[in-house]
Every structure is written in structure tokens, then in C-alpha cells.
């Protein structure tokens, strides 16, 4: 039992525990609070640990502005530390609320005085000690039993990784993120040393500027251009030169799908597939003499943003709205329209070379309502779906603005828009999520806009997203030394494909698309 005279000191320790977790950017969870609290009451009375805790609380106070925007240590934090220059640091500081300048200083002073003067409660109850040790070890041991790590180092790592003690979590997260950052930087540097190896037969672009707009998480049956009853794609529906109904993406998630959509796919006995990343549309355009650009509203580096930035590294010029995770607190307010001023700058520069510009959108990524720059434009009596339909409208508006910028600069252009993957319904049609088991997770829009086309063509043919890089190469006027249906002179001449296969995000194995389940749109 806690004595009345110690009640205040115990309350202080609980408050310190909650504060530490907040300052380091973690979520408030009972196991984190309890473990921090028990560490303070068991160890705080010893001089060594008093100094240890004081140092960590000072670090936490200094980390407050970063933790508030970025959360606990991740690749965004590491990349910001290693890559941010003076101008970017000044910009970051200028955006901070004024209290972020003096609150950390007040906290540091408070912590120094507290850990110097405060009398921590003394606890010697052996049963309480056993309880705390059990609390610490329960989840790590459970994880080890479930996943069966078979080496001492893997067992140790798994044990430490699952202890929800914020100081340990912070240290491990920073160590892991630093490793990811350094590894990915090295991989990107090695990757761009490997150039395109597909022989180019001829280069004859029909247009001066080509733009590839890669949308995010859009299934075509939620677009009015493909018959959806809510008119959320009026620009595409009325102004597209080609609306292709039938593109099947290679995979149901971004990092597995995009590499195969814009890079060459290497098949192994029709059972497995791997992406040959150096043979991508950007490296092909480089070899063909194009000026290449990559504009992205998704993360440059992150725990899962790995493969796509390796392809983007081939571009001669790149622009990212955010350096780290695509979805951290730092991404708040960073909508796809931030890419448009950069596009305007690119097109305002005179260049005799043809241009290939890739625009990678955050589009309709999950947490649909957070993706919206403006108010919800459609009411489907379902908040998530209403936001999803509205997010597609905002992408349609962005395409319209892209075309307007091209026209403003009197560009001879061709623009293609497709999404990386679709989604499937969840929670009794109250939400849409990644799911490899449904065909609609792979059915996406495929739409062209050309400056020299006055009439609209509709093509209803099912084709695979694998080797789409051949079609895109032919579209920009680059003939490759390959034999494939996508090398036809006209899009309409490409035959429909049979027995299309797809992969999921767990491995490179191929599965028959037509054997997957259907997921009809109940709002249509």
C-alpha cells in the first residue's frame, strides 16, 4: 500500500511518466506509463539513475518540436537531421508555434531542479518487483513463443523490441531508422549506377512534354469516367482523349505494384516475378535523350517507402514535398496541389529536349478524410466513402490544373493517368482497405490526355500492368528492341490479354486474377 505521505511523490512519478512518453512522440499506453513509473520509483533514489533520468528528460524536452510533428524516431527524423540545410531548418523553425521556443527551455530547467531536489519514493516490496518484471517480460516472451526466433541475437532483439519502455523504444527506433536511412541511401546510389539495359531501336517523340500521373488507391468503379453515378471525374469524363477500361495492376499495394508498372518485369517459369528496377521508364527516357523529372507527394525515405524512391533516383531532377514518411505528422497540410508550382517552374524553362515528368500523388490513400484539401463534396451517407469519392474529385481537379499549366506554356503534350492499385470494401462497406483477395484491388483507371486530340476514344480491353513500361516507352516515342503486344503503333491495336496474373504484397509468386473474388460497388 502507498502511504499517505508518499502519495504526492507517487503522483509526481506518474505525471513524469506520462510527460516523458508525450515528449518522445509515443502514444500513451498503460504498459508504457506503468514501466516508466516503476522505473522511477525503483531506481530514482539512486544517484546514478537520477542523473540518467535527468539526461533523458532533458533530451525529451529538446525533442518536443520534432516529436510533435514527426512522432518517435523514424526515417523522416534521421533524414531531417542528416540532410536538412540552414534554409530548411529556418523554414521549419519559422512554422513552429511560438510556445515551442520557450516550453522546452522551461521543461529543461524544471527537470534539472526536479531531479536534483525531488525525493523519489522508496519501494522494497518483493512482490511488486516480481509483478513489474512479469509485466515487462510478458509481451516479449509471448512474441518469442509465437514467432520462434532461432538465434541468440534474434531472440535478444525480439525481446528488447517488444518491451514498451519509452527510453528503450526511443533508442531502438533511432538506431533502426538510422540503419534504414543509411542502407537505402547506399542502395539508391548503387541503383543509379546501373543504367537501362534494354536496347533502344529508335526515338521519335510525337509531343514535346510527356507527364505520367500516378494516382493512389483508386479503383475505377468509383469514377464517373467509368460509370460511377456520382460525377467526381467531370474533367476526365469530358476531356480525356482515351479512356481505357481494363488495366489490371500487378499488385494490391504501392511498393509492390509501381515497380512493375514502370519497370521491366522478369518472370521465372511463369510462377514468380521480379522487377528489373534499372530498366524503368525514367532510365529509358534518359537514354533516349529526354530531360526527366520526378515530382512526389509521397515520402522520399521511410520504413516502407523503399523501392519507388530507388526508381525516382534515376530522374535528372526531383522534387519531394516531404523527405521522410509519407504519412507522418510532417505531412499535414501537404496536398498534391503542392506539386503544381514546381510543374509550372519546370515548364517555364525553355529546353530543346523533350521532357518526361512523373507526378506521384498521395491521392486517395487510406485515412481518406485527411487527404482532402477542401470540404467533402459528396454525401453517400458514409463518412469514409464520401471522403474517398471526394478525394478522387480532387485528383480529377489536379489533372485539370495540370493541363491548364501545360496550355499556359503552350506545350505540345500527352498526359497519362493511372493508379497504383485499387482497394476492397471492409467493415460492412463502411471503409475501403488493401486486400489482395479481391479483383477490385487491381482494377484501376488508365486515361490519356493529348493536346492534338479532339474526339474521345474508349477502349474496353483487359490488359496486365506487368511490362506496362513497354507501352509507356512506345507512348513517349521510344521503340525498344523487345517483342511484346505493347509495342503496337496505336493503343487501339493492342490485343486483349488472357490469363492475367497478379502478385500480392508478401511475395513474388503469381496468382490467377480471374480466380479472385469480386467486390461490387454498393454505392453505384
Image (cartoon, helix red, strand yellow):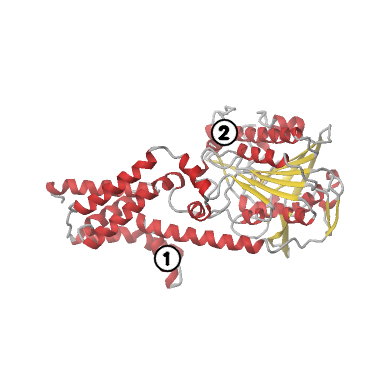
Residue 50 appears at what percent x and percent y?
A: 24, 58
Circles 1 and 2: CB atoms closer than 8 Å: no
Quarter of the figure with residue 271 = bottom right
Residue 421 image position (x, y, % from top left): 65, 46
Circle 2 packing at 10 Å, graded few (<14), some (14-19), many (20+), is some
Secondary structure type for disc 1: helix
Q: Quadrant of residue 425?
A: top right
In the displayed structure, 372 sits above or below 31; it is: above
Vertical placement of 210 versus 146: above or below? above
Near-viewer residue (424 or 447): 447
Work out which residue is located at the far bottom of the displayed protein and give it: 151
Name the spot of residue 35 as percent of width and height, x first: 30, 55
**In the drawing, does residue 66 fall left or right of residue 511?**
left
User: Label 2: which residue?
Assistant: 373
- Upstream in sequence: badge 1 or badge 2: 1
| The one of 429 and 242 positioned closer to us in this rendering | 242
- Relative horizontal placement of residue 220, taking residue 70 as reference (left or right): right
Q: Position of residue 284 (x, y in %)?
A: 76, 56
Tell me, yes or no, if residue 240 can be seen here. yes
Mark 1 and mark 2: span between their CA atoms? 41 Å
Residue drawn at x 15%, y 49% is: 6
So how many labels did they put on this image?
Answer: 2
**Is any atom of residue 131 visible in this view?**
no
Disc 1: which residue: 157
Outermost residue to the front: 86
Left/right of residue 410 with respect to residue 136 in the rendered view: right
Mark in the foreground, 1 or 2: 2
Amino acid at each position: 500500500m502507498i502511504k499517505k505521505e508518499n502519495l504526492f511523490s507517487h503522483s509526481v512519478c506518474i505525471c513524469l511518466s506520462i510527460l516523458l512518453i508525450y515528449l518522445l512522440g509515443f502514444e500513451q499506453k498503460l504498459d508504457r506509463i506503468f514501466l516508466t513509473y516503476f522505473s522511477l520509483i525503483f531506481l530514482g533514489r539512486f544517484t546514478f539513475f537520477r542523473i540518467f533520468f535527468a539526461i533523458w528528460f532533458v533530451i525529451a524536452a529538446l525533442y518536443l518540436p520534432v516529436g510533435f510533428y514527426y512522432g518517435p524516431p523514424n526515417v523522416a527524423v534521421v533524414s531531417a537531421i542528416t540532410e536538412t540545410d540552414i534554409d530548411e531548418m529556418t523554414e521549419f523553425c519559422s512554422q513552429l508555434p511560438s510556445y515551442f521556443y520557450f516550453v522546452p527551455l522551461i521543461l529543461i530547467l524544471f527537470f534539472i531542479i526536479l531531479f536534483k531536489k525531488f525525493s523519489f519514493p522508496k519501494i522494497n516490496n518483493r512482490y511488486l518487483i516480481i509483478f513489474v518484471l512479469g509485466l515487462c517480460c510478458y509481451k516479449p516472451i509471448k512474441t518469442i513463443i509465437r514467432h520462434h526466433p532461432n538465434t541468440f541475437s534474434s531472440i535478444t532483439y525480439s525481446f528488447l523490441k517488444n518491451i514498451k519502455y519509452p527510453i528503450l523504444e526511443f533508442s531502438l527506433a533511432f538506431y533502426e531508422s538510422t540503419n534504414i536511412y543509411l542502407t537505402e541511401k547506399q542502395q539508391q546510389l548503387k541503383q543509379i549506377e546501373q543504367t537501362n539495359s534494354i536496347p533502344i531501336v529508335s526515338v521519335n517523340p510525337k509531343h514535346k512534354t510527356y507527364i505520367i500521373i500516378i494516382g493512389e488507391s483508386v479503383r475505377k468503379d468509383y469514377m464517373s469516367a467509368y460509370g460511377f453515378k456520382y460525377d467526381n471525374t467531370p474533367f476526365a469524363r469530358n476531356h480525356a482523349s482515351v479512356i481505357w477500361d481494363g488495366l489490371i495492376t500487378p499488385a494490391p499495394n504501392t511498393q509492390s505494384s509501381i515497380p512493375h508498372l514502370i519497370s521491366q518485369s522478369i518472370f521465372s517459369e511463369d510462377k514468380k516475378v521480379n522487377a528489373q528496377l534499372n530498366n524503368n521508364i525514367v532510365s529509358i527516357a534518359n537514354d533516349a535523350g529526354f530531360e526527366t523529372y520526378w515530382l512526389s507527394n509521397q515520402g522520399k525515405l521511410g520504413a516502407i517507402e523503399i523501392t519507388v524512391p530507388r526508381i525516382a533516383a534515376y530522374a535528372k531532377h526531383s522534387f519531394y514535398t516531404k523527405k521522410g514518411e509519407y504519412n507522418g505528422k510532417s505531412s499535414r497540410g501537404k496536398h498534391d496541389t503542392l506539386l503544381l508550382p514546381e510543374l509550372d517552374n519546370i515548364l517555364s524553362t525553355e529546353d530543346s529536349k523533350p521532357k518526361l515528368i512523373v507526378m506521384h500523388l498521395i491521392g486517395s490513400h487510406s485515412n481518406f478524410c485527411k487527404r482532402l484539401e477542401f470540404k467533402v463534396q459528396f454525401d453517400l451517407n458514409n463518412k469514409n466513402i464520401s471522403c474517398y469519392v471526394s478525394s478522387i474529385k480532387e485528383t480529377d481537379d489536379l489533372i485539370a490544373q495540370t493541363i491548364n499549366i501545360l496550355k499556359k506554356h503552350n506545350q505540345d503534350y500527352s498526359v497519362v493517368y493511372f493508379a497504383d492499385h485499387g482497394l476492397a470494401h471492409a467493415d460492412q462497406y463502411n471503409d475501403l482497405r488493401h486486400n489482395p483477395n479481391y479483383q477490385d484491388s487491381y482494377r484501376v483507371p488508365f486515361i490519356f490526355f493529348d493536346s492534338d486530340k479532339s474526339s474521345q476514344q474508349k477502349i474496353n480491353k483487359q490488359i496486365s500492368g506487368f511490362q506496362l513500361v513497354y507501352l509507356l516507352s512506345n507512348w513517349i516515342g521510344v521503340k525498344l528492341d523487345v517483342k511484346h503486344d505493347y509495342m503496337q503503333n496505336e493503343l487501339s491495336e493492342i490485343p486483349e490479354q488472357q490469363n492475367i496474373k497478379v502478385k500480392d504484397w508478401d511475395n513474388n509468386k503469381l496468382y490467377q486474377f480471374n480466380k479472385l473474388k469480386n467486390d461490387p460497388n454498393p454505392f453505384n
